[in-house]
Amino acid sequence: MGERRAAEFLLTGQAMGAGDAAEAGLITRAVPHDELPGEVERVIASVASRKGRSGGITRRLMHAGRTAGLRDHLEAEAENIARLAGEEAAKTSIAAFLAR
């Protein structure tokens, strides 16, 4: 959320609804309350369906990127890409992507 938009909410006391939060990038999506359990299950299933070690490595890189310098972070990404590229799960995923 940009400084001006944040100032608007903070200085006016305006309530922020789910749509505003999604638009500002504070949440990834807003869903109606009655659809929330199904959406949670869908997201969990999507994350859990990832094969190989790439999900865990991606999460670690995301967290490390908050404090690492750009050069160090890019080196860590390159090392992990090179390491994962030889794994069977990566080869299968790349082949499926290229077949689209």
Image: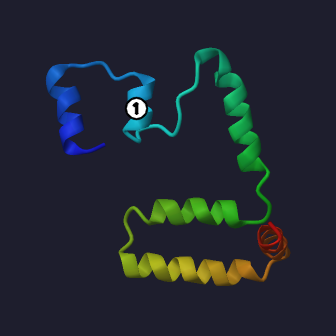
In the orientation shown, which residue stands out farthest toward the top? 34
Q: Is residue 61 left or right of residue 55?
A: left
Q: In percent of the image, x 44 and y 27: which residue is there?
A: 19
Give the vertical position of 80 relative to 37 (above or below): below
Q: Is residue 85 left or right of residue 29?
A: right
Callout count: 1
Give the vertical position of 44 relative to 12 (above or below): below
For the C terminus, the quadrant is: bottom right
Q: Position of residue 33 (x, y in %)?
A: 59, 17
Q: Which colour scheme is used?
A: rainbow
Q: Where is residue 24 in the image (x, y as percent from the top left)?
A: 36, 38
Q: Nearer the viewer, residue 63 or 36?
A: 36
Q: In this view, does 65 lie to the left or right of 84?
A: left
Q: What element carries label 1?
A: helix
Kindly identify the amino acid type of the residue bearing the numbered disc 1. Answer: Ala
Q: Position of residue 55 (x, y in %)?
A: 67, 60
Q: Nearer the viewer, residue 80 or 27?
A: 27
Q: In percent of the image, x 37 and y 65: which residue is there?
A: 67
Q: In this view, does 83 lie to the left or right of 15?
A: right
Q: Where is residue 77 in the image (x, y as percent from the top left)?
A: 54, 76
Q: In percent of the image, x 65 and y 61: which residue is there?
A: 56
Give the vertical position of 83 relative to 10 (above or below): below
Using the rendered view, name the quadrant where residue 82 is placed.
Answer: bottom right
Q: How crowded is mark 1: few (under 14 residues within 10 Å), some or many (20 or more)?
A: some
For the N terminus, the quadrant is: top left
Q: In percent of the image, x 41 and y 39: which residue is there?
A: 26
Using the rendered view, name the quadrant where residue 44 is placed.
Answer: top right
Residue wearing tag 1: 21
In the orientation shown, which residue stands out farthest toward the left? 11
